[in-house]
Image (spheres, rainbow, N blue to C red):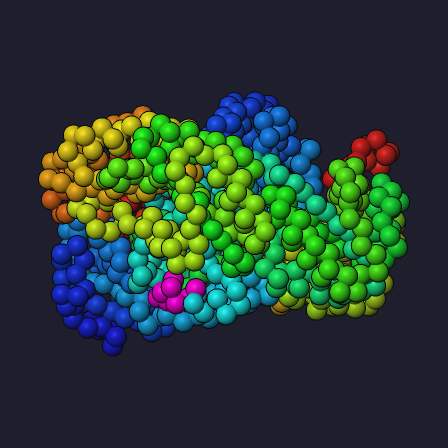
Amino acid sequence: MIVDFLRPGTAADRVDGEVPPQVAEPDTPQAFADVLKQASADRLPTVIRGGGTKLSWGRPPATVDLVVATSRLNRLIAHRHGDLTATVQAGMRLRELNAALSSQRQWLPIDSAFDQATIGGVVATNDAGPSRHRHGTPRDLVIGITLALTDGRVVKAGGTVVKNVAGYDLGKLVSGSHGTLAGIVDVTFKLVPTPQTSATLVVWHPDAAALARDVAALDATQIEPAAFDVRMQDGEMPFQLKLRIATSPAACDAQIAAARALVSGQTTILTEIAEQAAWAAQLDPMGHGDATVRFSWLPSRLPQVLTMLEEMQRSGTRLLFAGRVVGTGALQLSGEMPALAAAVERLRASADVGNVVLLRGSRELKERVDVWGPERPSDRVARAVKQSLDPAGILNAGRGPI
Amino acid sequence: MSGGALPVPGGIVISLARLNRVLDVDIPNRRVTVEPGVTNLEITRQVAPFGYYYAPDPSSQQVCSIGGNVAENSGGAHCLKYGFTVHHVLEAEAVMPDGEIICIGSSLPDACGPDLLGLLVGSEGTLAVVTKVVVRILRKPETVQTLLAAYNSTSDAGAAVSEIIAAGIVPAAVEMMDALAIRAAEAAVHPNFPPADTVLIVELDGPVAEVRELFATVEAICRRAGATVVEVAENDEQRMRIWRGRKAAFAAMGRVSPNYYVQDGVVPRTKLPEVLGRIRALSERSGLAIGNVFHAGDGNLHPLICYDERIPGQSKLAEEVAGEILTYCVEAGGSITGEHGVGADKKDYMPRMFSADDLDVMQQVRDAVDPHRLCNPGKVLPTPRLCGEVPGPYRAHPVEKAGLAERF
C-alpha cells in the first residue's frame, strides 16, 4: 500500500494490545476514502481511530493491519449560530468543539467520560452521558453526515437543516456502528442554547428501596430535569440520586425547591464547580476498575436492578454503578476474572436487564464472555448493509457489533 | 402528500388499516405499543387521563396513522422542541422483504450496533412493512402559554423569531402565517386574528416558573420587533382558537382559491426572509397568488400556490412555480422536504440536493435490505418514471368538493 500519509505503527497506536504495522493520517475527505479503498483492495483489517479513548471497546482483535486516524480532519467547518447548527470534522475533540460553540452561548449536549473523545468517536459509538435525559444520544442530534466509503467515494446524507426527510438518514445508520460501515468524515448537529443557570439536588440513602421510591416520586412530577441519575458506591450512604435543573434562574430555584420537598433522603444542593464535579463523577465507571459493563432496563425495574447489584456486591465483587433514570447505566467491576465473567453472565441471564455490553475488560475476560452478547434477529439486516458497504469486511473486522 | 402511497402498476397494495389495536399502555415505563393503523391522536387519548401525551403532532393527527408517521418521520408544530417521530419510536416490529418478522431497535435504551431503526423511520415504506411500534410518551408539561403577534411585514416577524432563538429560548412552537393564509383561515374557521400582513404564533411550555419567566421575555421581544398587536391566550379556549386558525390554514385555502398546490420545503431559519422575498417575487412574476403558512422555528415552509385548473395552462404553471420554490430552498442550503416526504412527487428533485454518488449509496443500502425491490418500488430515489404515475397538484376528493369532509 503506497500512500504518502502512511507511517509505521508505534506502541502509542496499540489496539487492545496489538501494535498495527501501519497508521494512516489522511488530511482530506477524499484521502480518507482513498486509503479505505486501498485497504479494501488489499483486504487489510482496519480500525478507524479518533481520540483513541474507546479503542479497547469491542472484541479482541485477531489482527489489525491498519489504523486510520482522523487526527488531521479536525476543523470546525461552520457554526451557524442563528440556525443552532454546526458542521464539524470527525477528528475534532468534543471538548474543543464545545469551547468554540460557547462563544455564542450554545453547545452540543453530549457528555463524554473522556477528555480526548472526538466527534467521530462519540457518533460511531453513540456514547452518551447524563445529558441524554433531556437531549437524547448523539444519533438524536445528528442532522447530516459525510462518509468515506471503502469503495473510495465520499458521500453525504441529511443536510444542514434540523427538519429534513429527503433520502435515507445514513447519519443515524452509522451511529452506534462502531466503525464497521464507513469512515465518518464530518457531522452536522443541531445545537442547544447553554442554560442560563443550573443547580443539582443530591439525595443520599442508606438503602436501595428508599432511593427507588424517591426516584419514582420525582419522576411522576412535572419537574423537567436536564439530567436525572442514580449512583451506587461503597460506604455508609451507598445510594444517591442526582437531579439537575438547568433553566432560567427563578425557575431553577423553584424546581429545586419542589424536588427537595418531595424526597425522603438526606439532601444537598450543588452549584458551580461542585455541581460540575458531581456530574463528571457520574462518568467514573467508564474508566478505572478492571471492567466496565453497560446495560439497560425498563425504568420501573430500577429496584430489581439495584437489588441484583447489591447481591453481586455481597458475593465479593467490588463495584461502582452510575445509571440514568431513563434506564441505562455503566457498571465498573473490580475483582478476579472468573468473578467478573460471572457478573456479566448474571446480567445477561436476568429478565430485568438487556442490551448488556462489556465495554472494557482484559483480553482474558473478553475471550471468556462475548463483548456484544447474543445475536439478535435484526443483526442479519445490519450484516447485509455491512456486506454492501464493506464487501471486503475490513472495517473493525471481528471486533465490532456486526 | 408526496404520492408516497400511490399504487404502482402491477403492484400489490398492503393496507394496514385493520391493524389498529393499541396493544399495551405502560404508564410506569412511559411506553405505548400500537399497531400501525392506530391514529397519532389515539395514543395521546389513551394516555391523557394519566397526564401523559405523545409528542409528535402533525396537523393531520386526528386521521394520520402511526405507521404512516413512522414511514414519513412525521413532525408537527411542536417538533422544534420535541423532535420528530424518529426521536419517539423505540422499537418496531417489521415484516422484511423476505417475509421474516423481526424487531428493529429495542424498547430498552442503547440497542447495540448500527441504528437500523433510525434508517427505517422515514424510509417511506421502501425497506420493510412495519407491523408494530413501541413509542415513548412524555409527561404533560405543567403549563402552556401561547401568544399571537401581528406584524406589518414578514421580515419584522422573522426578526422576532431570530431574537427569541438568540435569547437562548427554545419555544415549543413558532408558527407564521401571511396575509393570504390569514384571510383563508378567517373565511374557514373564524379564529378572529387581528388584521396583519403576518402573524406569528409562539408557544412555550414547561414548569410554571420557567414559562412565566421566559414568556415575559418573548412578549417583550415580539413587541420590540414591531408587533402591532400582541394577544396572549388567557385560557385553553383562546389557545385552541389560535391553533384552530393555524391548523385549518391548508384546508382553508379552498375558500380563497379554486385549486391550490401545497409545497413543503426547508430553509435554514436565518434564510427565511430572503427566501420569502424570492417567493413573493415569483408570485408577482407568475401571476399566481402564494400563501405562506410555516414552522418558522425550524424553517419548514409550506407555500400554498393558488391556481384555477379551468384556466388552460395554470395547473402546469402551478407545478412549475412549486418546483421553483424547491430550487430556492436548496440554494439557501435547505431541503426539498421537511415532513411530507419524497414519495413519487419529489424524487426527480433529489439530484438537486444529493450527488449521483450520494443517491447511489442510498440505493445500495436499499438493495441490501430489499434486494428484489419489492417495497414501495419507484419511490424516493430517482428512477425513470413509470407509466401510469401522475404526480402533481392535489386533487380534491368528491366528498371534499361537496363540503362533506375537510382536508387536514
> Is residue A298 found inside the magenta-colored segment of the image?
no
The foreground one among A252 and A353 is A252
Q: Is residue A23 visible?
A: yes
Q: Is residue B121 left or right of residue B49?
A: left
Q: Residue at x 43, y 32 (%)?
A: A264
Above/below status of B274 relative to A374: below
Indicate the quadrant containing the C terminus of chain B: top left, top right, bottom left or bottom right.
top right
Q: Residue at x 87, y 42 (%)?
A: B190
Q: Residue at x 29, y 28 (%)?
A: A307
Above/below status of B337 relative to A201: below
The foreground one among A161 and B16 is A161
Residue B300 picture location, percent across and down: 65, 55
Q: Main secondary structure of the magenta part?
A: helix
Above/below status of A298 relative to A18: above
Q: Residue at x 37, y 46 (%)?
A: B114
Q: Is residue B174 left or right of residue B105?
A: right
Residue B110 picture location, percent across and down: 37, 41
Query: Magenta segment range?
Result: A91-98
Q: Is residue A151 visible?
A: no
